[in-house]
Each structure stands twice: as C-alpha cells, then as structure tokens.
C-alpha cells in the first residue's frame, strides 16, 4: 500500500458521455471515513530499531477510547504479515506498545503498520502508518575502542557501530568525551590529540549517529555513550623542591617478574633511575629521582621500558617541563592585631629556583570561610568580633603566567589565635577568683556559727553587778545594804569568784571578811 487511510479517503470519479454533438464529462466526489467513534484510534505511533535487530513500537490510547479498549499491531511488507507477540500495557491494562525481536522484514523497504482496536462500549477506529525502519534505527556506540599513548599525544581508534546491514564508514559521525571535554563531528576511524597533561588520568568514551548528508538514514539521534576506557600510563610529580616521583600502572595482566627501566633524558644527557618502588606482588610501580641535574624550565623526556621473557610489555615515552609538575608547599604565616583588624603576612613557598612573588596565588581559610585568588604577601581584614577565636590556614598555587600547573598545595597547619585574648583571660581569672573568695567566706561563717568558735576565742566579759542587784532584790535587802555592796563592786576579782552561784547574805559577808575584802 502506498498511502494511509485512517484519516479517510476522498474519491473523485470522472466519467463522460458521448452524444451526437459532443462529449460530456461528469465528475463526482466522495469522502469515505473509517468506522468507529472519533478520537478512539491509537495516537502518536512510532517505531525504533535498537541492538541492531530489535524493533520497539509504541502508541497512546485515543482520547475518547474507553478504559476496556484493546489494540493490536500488525506489520506488513509485501505479502508478509508480522503480528506482535509481546505487548506493553498502561495503567488501565490497555496495550500501548510492542516489542518484536528480529522480525522477518527488510529494514530498508517501506513497512505498513496497522493498529486496530475494539471495545465493548463502542466501535474503535484504526490507525495505519507507512515508514522505513532504517530511518528509525538507534545506533550502538562504536566498537573495539583502543587508546594508544605516544609522547604527549593520545591516539584513539575504533570500529563503526554494528548495524542490520553493511553501512559504510561514511554513514557515521562520532563524538568523543575525554575527561569531560566533548568533541563532536568526527568522521573516520581514528582521532589524535595532544592536549593531555602528564599527570591526568585519561577517561575516554564515544557515541555515534547517522550522517544525514550521505542519505544513509534520517535518524538524528545519538547512540548512548560507550563504557569508559581508562588509559593506564605513568605520572610524575615534583615535591620537596627537587625530588621527582614517577608512578605507573599497566594492570594486573603484566607478569609479576616484569622489570622496568626509567630513563630521564635531555639532549645527550641521560639519567637512569636507581630507586624503584614495588607493589604487593613485587612488581615495579614507581621510581624516585632525587635532585636530578636538569633545568626545570626546559622540556625533558622520560622513557619507561618493560622487560619480560614471556610477553611483550608496551613502552611509554612522555615529555614535559618539570616546572609544570611542581607541587608547592604551603606558605608560612605571620599574624598580628591592630584593634579589631587582623593582618596576615607570609613567605613565598620554597621552590627549586628564585621565583618572583607574582608567580603565586594564595587561598586563606579563616574559620572555614575561604578567600581565594589573593596575590602579594599580606592580607588585612576587619570583619572580626572582639574575643572571637580564629583558626587560620593558607595554601598556594602557581599563577598561569609562570606554570601550567593549576593544582593547589595542601593547607598549612592551622594557626589558632583570638583578638584581645590576654585581657579576656585576665577578666575570666578575676571573676573566678571573686567567686571562690565569696564561697570561702560563706563557708567560714557557717563553721563559726555551727561550732561557736567565736565564743571560744573571744569570751564575753562578766557583769557581776547586775547579778548582785537582782539577788538583793529577790532577798529583800535594804537600800543601805545595796549601796554598801555597790562600793564593794570595785573589787572585780573578788566578786567574779561568785558570779555563778550567790550564797546567802550572811555566809557571803563572812566569806568576804575572811578573805580581807573591805
């Protein structure tokens, strides 16, 4: 069939009648619409090919289709009908998709698709469509991706995606993702780049799509990304000003008895590594060159060669400027206060040679608030609170004008300080001392009251005169006798002997006479 009929047909019938005078032409028009309730036919029909030979078709139930509507799909090519056997359903249980595995049809020839439906409530209209499956094929990613590293260049090679037919290499366009940097519009079977830092792990993935300009397909969709391919190669860092540390990893496939030779070369000068590092299997995985006699501003090359009697171990050559691989040490900090202002000064990081201070950029961490891209050798801030305790650290990195290495150094040791911390400590000491003194005085007062300590150390002075007068009044003595006894009161020592117990008057007078008291 060369056309679809689900929207109806418009027929025009042309006829003529021959008379004796002339020919008379007649034309009549007819519009034929499919049976069924309007808007009950399937909608948004589409098909795609994936995994080379799997066909997946989908549609939506008609807007006016009852909930019990069911649909069926048949693909027809020439005299071959391919009914669907694997349906998908929606939340109402209606069939809205179909999966066909390797159908017996030609993907490059027009296919007629018919979706019919039925319901117990009403008649359902049908949907038909014409298309070429090849125009809807979703490609797979490229196959057999291989990475080859030579010097500072990375070469990527691959094979074209597998398709249902033998489409040529010219039918595909590729996109490559290298460490998050995507490059598109690539044709052919290889790609080379030299924009790779020595110490950066290379993570590569690819995808493909049809080239529309060559008429191979009308599908504009990209394939999914391939699995990432990680290239294992060696790296180098420079620490402690002039020590070079190399490391490499060729995977567990390398035999344990493999031995490597690392040679650092510049023009006619060659330096062979003598200090190798090994992993838990005893394989060499690193090397340290201490203070090699090379210029850090000029390019040097490294050759890493593997030796094994059983298998071939690939060799690697890389070239770089040592100055681009230097890991800086954090600066040394000095801090001073001026009222509520904090002033920081520091020394430039130590390097292999005398480097101008404009070659460094700094980051400052004050109580977890990070300030970056600071230049110079000092920094002043006034956004501080009195008595606030501070934790300060710094880090440094190269300015891009002096090195391509943009990695930060580690943070320096934290410097813990606080504005007016001496006065604050003195105030705290005085407050604590006052509280302790008040508590001690309260405790001593409690002891004196509880055990009558004050009366033991400071006894009261006796007052015998008042006792005597009370005694005289009780015994009815005359005023004359009381006056006489008042004169005798002056001898306090004599009277005090009888303060606790006063004897009868006659006995008292005799006793006083016997003791010579007048």
Image (spheres, rainbow, N blue to C red):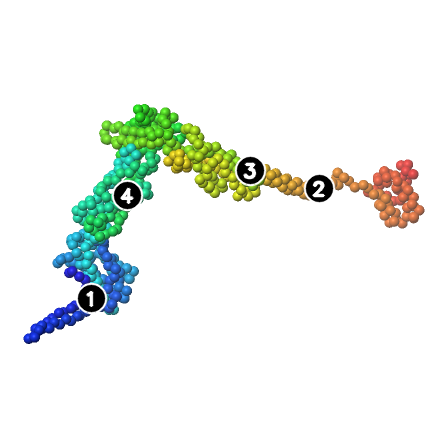
| Discs 1/2, front | 1
Q: Which residue is drawn at 72% across and 40% down?
A: 453
Give the alpha-carbon distance from disc 4 to disc 3, as whole Å. Answer: 55 Å
Please provide percent x and percent y for residue 136: 22, 53
**10 Å neighbourhood of mark 1: few (<14), some, or many (≥20)?**
few
Residue contact at pointers 4 and 1, CB within 8 angstroms: no
Residue 295 visible in the current orientation: yes
The disc at residue 176 is 4
Q: Look at the image and tell me in which quarter the N terminus lies.
A: bottom left
**10 Å neighbourhood of mark 4: few (<14), some, or many (≥20)?**
many
| Discs 2/4, front | 4
The disc at residue 115 is none
Please provide percent x and percent y for residue 146: 25, 39
Q: Badge 1 is on which residue?
A: 8
Q: Badge 3 is on which residue?
A: 337
Q: Badge 2 is on which residue?
A: 448
Give the alpha-carbon distance from disc 1 to disc 2, as whole Å. Answer: 118 Å
Q: Is mark 3 on a helix, strand or loop?
A: strand
Q: Look at the image and tell me in which quarter the C terminus lies.
A: top right
């Amino acid at each position: 069939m060369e056309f679809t009929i689900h929207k109806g047909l418009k027929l025009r019938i042309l006829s003529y009648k021959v008379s004796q005078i002339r020919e008379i032409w007649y034309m009549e028009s007819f519009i034929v619409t499919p049976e069924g309730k309007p808007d009950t036919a399937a909608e948004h029909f589409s098909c795609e090919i994936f995994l080379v030979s799997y066909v997946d078709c989908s549609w939506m139930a008609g807007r006016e289709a009852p909930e019990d509507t069911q649909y069926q799909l048949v693909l027809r090519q020439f005299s071959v009908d391919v009914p669907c056997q694997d349906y998908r359903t929606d939340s109402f249980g209606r069939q809205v998709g179909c999966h066909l595995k390797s159908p017996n049809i030609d993907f490059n020839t027009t296919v007629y698709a018919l979706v019919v439906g039925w319901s117990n409530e009403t008649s359902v209209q049908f949907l038909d469509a014409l298309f070429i499956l090849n125009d809807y094929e979703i490609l797979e990613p490229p196959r057999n991706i291989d990475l080859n590293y030579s010097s500072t260049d990375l070469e990527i090679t691959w094979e074209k995606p597998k398709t249902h037919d033998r489409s040529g290499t010219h039918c595909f366009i590729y996109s490559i993702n290298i460490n998050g940097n995507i490059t598109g519009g690539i044709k052919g079977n290889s790609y080379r780049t030299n924009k790779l830092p020595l110490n950066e792990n290379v993570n590569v993935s690819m995808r493909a799509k049809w080239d529309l300009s060559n008429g191979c397909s009308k599908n504009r969709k990209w394939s999914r990304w391939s699995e990432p391919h990680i290239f294992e190669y060696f790296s180098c860092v420079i620490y402690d000003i002039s020590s070079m540390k190399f490391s490499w990893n060729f995977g567990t496939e390398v035999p344990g008895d493999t031995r490597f030779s690392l040679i650092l070369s510049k023009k006619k000068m060659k330096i062979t590594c003598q200090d190798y590092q090994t992993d838990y299997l005893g394989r060499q995985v690193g090397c340290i060159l201490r203070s090699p006699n090379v210029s850090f501003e000029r390019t040097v090359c490294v050759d890493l060669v593997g030796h094994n009697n059983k298998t071939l171990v690939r060799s690697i050559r890389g070239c770089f400027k040592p100055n681009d691989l230097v890991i800086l040490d954090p600066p040394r900090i000095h801090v001073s206060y001026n009222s509520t202002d904090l002033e920081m000064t520091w020394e430039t990081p130590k390097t292999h040679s005398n480097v101008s201070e404009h070659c460094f950029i700094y980051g400052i961490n004050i109580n977890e608030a990070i300030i970056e891209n600071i230049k110079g050798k000092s920094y002043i801030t006034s956004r501080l609170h009195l008595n606030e305790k501070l934790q300060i650290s710094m880090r440094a990195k190269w300015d891009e004008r002096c090195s391509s290495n943009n990695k930060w150094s580690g943070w320096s040791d934290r410097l813990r300080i606080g504005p007016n911390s001496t006065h604050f400590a003195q105030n705290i000491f005085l407050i604590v001392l006052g509280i302790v003194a008040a508590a001690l005085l309260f405790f001593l007062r409690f002891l004196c009251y509880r055990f009558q300590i004050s009366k033991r150390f400071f006894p009261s002075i006796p007052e015998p005169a008042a006792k005597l007068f009370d005694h005289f009044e009780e015994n009815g003595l005359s005023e004359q006798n009381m006056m006489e006894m008042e004169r005798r009161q002056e001898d306090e020592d004599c009277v005090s002997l009888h303060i606790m117990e006063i004897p009868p008057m006659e006995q008292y007078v005799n006793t006083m006479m016997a003791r010579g008291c007048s």
